[in-house]
Image (cartoon, helix red, strand yellow):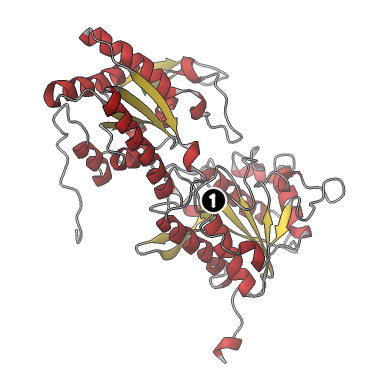
Amino acid sequence: MESNRPKKGDHIKRVGIVFSGGPAPAANAVISSAATSFLEDNREVIGFFHGYSNLQDYHPVSRRLVPDKHYRVFSERDLRGLRNSRGIIIGTARANPGKSISKAEDFGDPAKTERLRNVYNALVDLEIDALISIGGDDTLKTANFMARFQETLPPESKRIAVVHVPKTIDNDYRGIDFTFGFFTAVDFMAKEVQNLRADAIATRCYYIVETMGRKASWLAYGVAIAGESNLVLGVEDVDDSLSLWETIPAKDGKPAEKRRCLDLGKLLDRIVNVMITREQKYDKQYGTIVLAEGLAELLPSQAIDNLPRDEHGHLSVGNVGFGKLVAAQVAARYEERTGAKKKVTGVQLGYESRCSVPHAFDVMLGSQLGIGAYRALVEENLNASMVSVTGQLDLQYVPFAELVNPENLKTEIRFLQPGSDLHRLARLLETRVDRLPDWSSGQRRGE
């Protein structure tokens, strides 16, 4: 009799999957695991191609969605052997249907919700009962917008449940310890740093390696630790010893304000100090330095104000060329301080890792998150929730309300905490120039 008992999610007959933002290893593990779970349960699954780019422009007459051009109705054959594959079977894009939304009142503005309504209408016309969103913090924001938008609809309107799976190689996500793709990206880039280290030893030079990671430094620290770098620095390290204050002039009715920014001169001296220490103390004429790309956002305003931004308003830090900029100036500062020349080369890493073959752990994590999306909808009958894991891949579900600021509707970045054990690990492994900070002993098991 137990097997005949109705499931909580029996009303869900057809599910849509959308992947948005940058690629990440094990993306197909998430998609295939989720889709397979629904297919095995005799429910249909549609994968939408290239994020929200087609959905947000949908019109029932002039811009209808065409099967195998704008979406795929998945079959079991589509999903065979997909879990360990590179890339994203449904592609991705950075289209942002909620771009005009900045506060709760905007949901009542038809002009600002036009593209959200287009997405909703497309899902309704395709008889979608639930949407699985896979993406970074901006995609989480869009998923929250889709759930919030439906709250403004008449009571008789169809409701489409929305659950979100966190995705980013940057690992800067609140609500989950590690995101799928992070360890693969770390492993891939760390091997690149090891190759550069071997080159540096052979040629007695230095490499300044700029890693992806956006504003947080998780990737930089992981790559530096696994790649045996001699120094790693990120946004979280910009304290008084590496910063200065600038005044932002009043503009557009906003008052003048103070802004902490990176003191490039202090950064150069920190790096050159490591180089000189390695020479004098260890007779090492080579090395690798890892810098998080997010440091570029802390450059003085005049250096970044006119640089391009993406669909979500973020500075395209990868286009700044921060690593190469620092490398050229480190070489000049080293010569200024020592009277000797040293070859210092800037290298940018990140794009190569996003579609690399996924690490076994990321395949396991991605698969559990995909299964978690199925279980959230069918077993738990959830809506407006993010799928997460804790401990030994134990599933948990976090309401959007706990992840999104109710006032500005933005998500919050999770930074690497200075003084945390992971942060201290890097400090203990790299070349020491100064005495380590007097950290507290930290919390231990049972405390």
Report the residue at 66% width, 66% height from top: 77
- Examine the rendered structure and indicate whether residue 111 appears above or below residue 14: above
Res 115 seen here: yes
- Examine the rendered structure and indicate whether residue 265 appears above or below residue 184: above
Q: Nearer the viewer, residue 161 or 37?
A: 37
For disc 1, the marked residue is 86
Quadrant for the C terminus in the image: bottom left
Where residue 415 sits, quadrant-wise, is top left
Quadrant for the N terminus in the image: bottom right
From the viewer's perspective, tell me whether residue 287 is left or right of residue 411. left
Residue 283: x and y in percent read 15, 24
Q: Nearer the viewer, residue 134 or 226?
A: 226
From the viewer's perspective, tell me whether residue 337 is left or right of residue 233. left
Residue 73: x and y in percent read 71, 61
Res 382 seen here: no
Q: Tell which residue pokes out farthest to the bottom in this image.
A: 1
Report the residue at 56% width, 67% height from top: 374
Number of numbered discs on residues: 1
Q: Secondary structure at mark 1?
A: loop
From the viewer's perspective, tell me whether residue 168 is left or right of residue 94. left
Mark 1 closeness class: few <14, some 14–19, many ≥20 residues within 10 Å: some
Residue 184: x and y in percent read 42, 48
Where residue 277 sits, quadrant-wise, is top left
Check disc 1 and give the amino acid type. Answer: Arg
